[in-house]
Structure formats: C-alpha cells, structure tokens
C-alpha cells in the first residue's frame, strides 16, 4: 500500500500556504484534535463532517503535487515560468522560477527536495511572498 503522506505536502507547508491565503480546496485535509499532537489526514468528506466539531483545533488542505501545479498555473504565477524537473542521479526534484520574461533570465528561485509535493509547495510559497512583497 502506498504511503499517502508522500503524495501530499507536509503539514507545516500546508499550514503556511493557508496562512498565506491559499484557498482551501484540496481533496484531502489535515486535522488536529484539541489536546493532542497527533495530526490526521482525512478526505474532504470526512473533514466536512468534522469541521464543526468542538474537538477540532486546526484544519487545512493537504495539497497534492497536481493541486499545487494547478495553483501555480491558474492563480497568477505562470508569468514566473514555474518549472519542476526530476534529477535521476540524485533521485530528487528541482523547482525553478524565473523573472518575468523567460528562462533566458537568471532564475529567482531554485530548490531541490526529495518529494515533489514539498518542492512544489516551497516554490508556491516563494512566489506568493514575492508577489505580495513579503520577505
């Protein structure tokens, strides 16, 4: 059975995306119950049932790589030509972004990571902060 936690962004990255104002529309959600440090990964249907629970202390989307990709393309970041490549030698993902104008300009972001989801989310976090003047 595939470990689904490798198919979604980490809780910390998803929490930061929510704090930066990313719309919470994933198929999966992170939940945390009051008085517990344990974090649960649930489907949207399960999360909707638990949203009004008095026990719930935090909820945020658990974005997949494709959901992050859609946000990068459709939510105003494609001008930076966000790009993800897989490095077969190092078995890692590399994310790039460029100044508006093309890949012939120096990249403004380059990050390598083990998992595509977190690498993409770090790229999105960088671009949101850049667009909003957050340092």
Image (cartoon, rainbow, N blue to C red):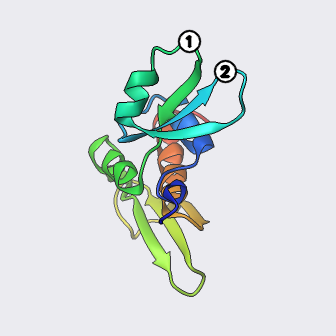
Q: In this view, does 69 lie to the left or right of 1?
A: left
Task: State which quadrant residue 66 falls in.
Answer: bottom left
* SS under mark 2: loop
Location of residue 103 with respect to 52 vertically, above or below: below
- Could you tell me residue 49's position as x and y percent? 39, 23
Between discs 2 and 1, the one toward the N terminus: 2
Residue in the foreground of this view, choosing between 33 and 113: 33
Q: Are marks 2 and 1 in contact (CB under 8 Å)?
A: yes
Residue that appears at 35% across and 41% down: 27
Location of residue 110 with respect to 22 vertically, above or below: below
Task: State which quadrant residue 54 falls in.
Answer: top right
Residue in the foreground of this view, choosing between 63 and 33: 33
Residue in the foreground of this view, choosing between 6 and 23: 6
The residue lying furthest to the left in this view is 74
- Could you tell me residue 121's position as x and y percent? 50, 50
- Could you tell me residue 107's position as x and y percent? 50, 63
Quarter placement of the C terminus: top right
The mark tally for this picture is: 2
Q: Residues within 10 Å of mark 2 (few under 14, many from 20)?
A: few
Q: Rounded to the nearest whole Å, what is the CA distance between mark 2 and mark 1?
A: 8 Å
In this rendering, does residue 24 appear at all? Answer: no
In this rendering, does residue 60 appear at all? Answer: yes
Q: Is residue 133 left or right of residue 28?
A: right
On the image, numbered disc 1 is attached to which residue?
54
On the image, numbered disc 2 is attached to which residue?
34
- Could you tell me residue 36's position as x and y percent? 71, 28
Q: Is residue 121 left or right of residue 69?
A: right
Residue that appears at 47% across and 47% down: 124
Q: How crowded is mark 1: few (under 14 residues within 10 Å), some or many (20 or more)?
A: few
């Amino acid at each position: 059975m595939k470990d689904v936690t490798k198919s979604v962004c980490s809780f910390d990255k998803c929490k930061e995306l929510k704090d930066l104002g990313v719309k919470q529309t994933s198929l999966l959600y992170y939940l945390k119950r009051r008085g517990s440090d344990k974090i649960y990964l649930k489907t949207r249907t399960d999360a909707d049932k638990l949203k009004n629970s008095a026990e719930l202390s935090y909820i945020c989307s658990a974005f997949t790589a494709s959901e992050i990709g859609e946000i990068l393309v459709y939510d105003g970041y494609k001008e930076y030509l966000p790009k993800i490549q897989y490095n077969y030698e190092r078995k890692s993902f590399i994310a790039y972004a460029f100044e508006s104008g093309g890949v012939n300009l120096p990249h403004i972001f380059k990050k390598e990571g083990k998992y595509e989801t977190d690498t993409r989310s770090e790229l999105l976090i960088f671009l949101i902060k850049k667009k909003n003047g957050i340092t």
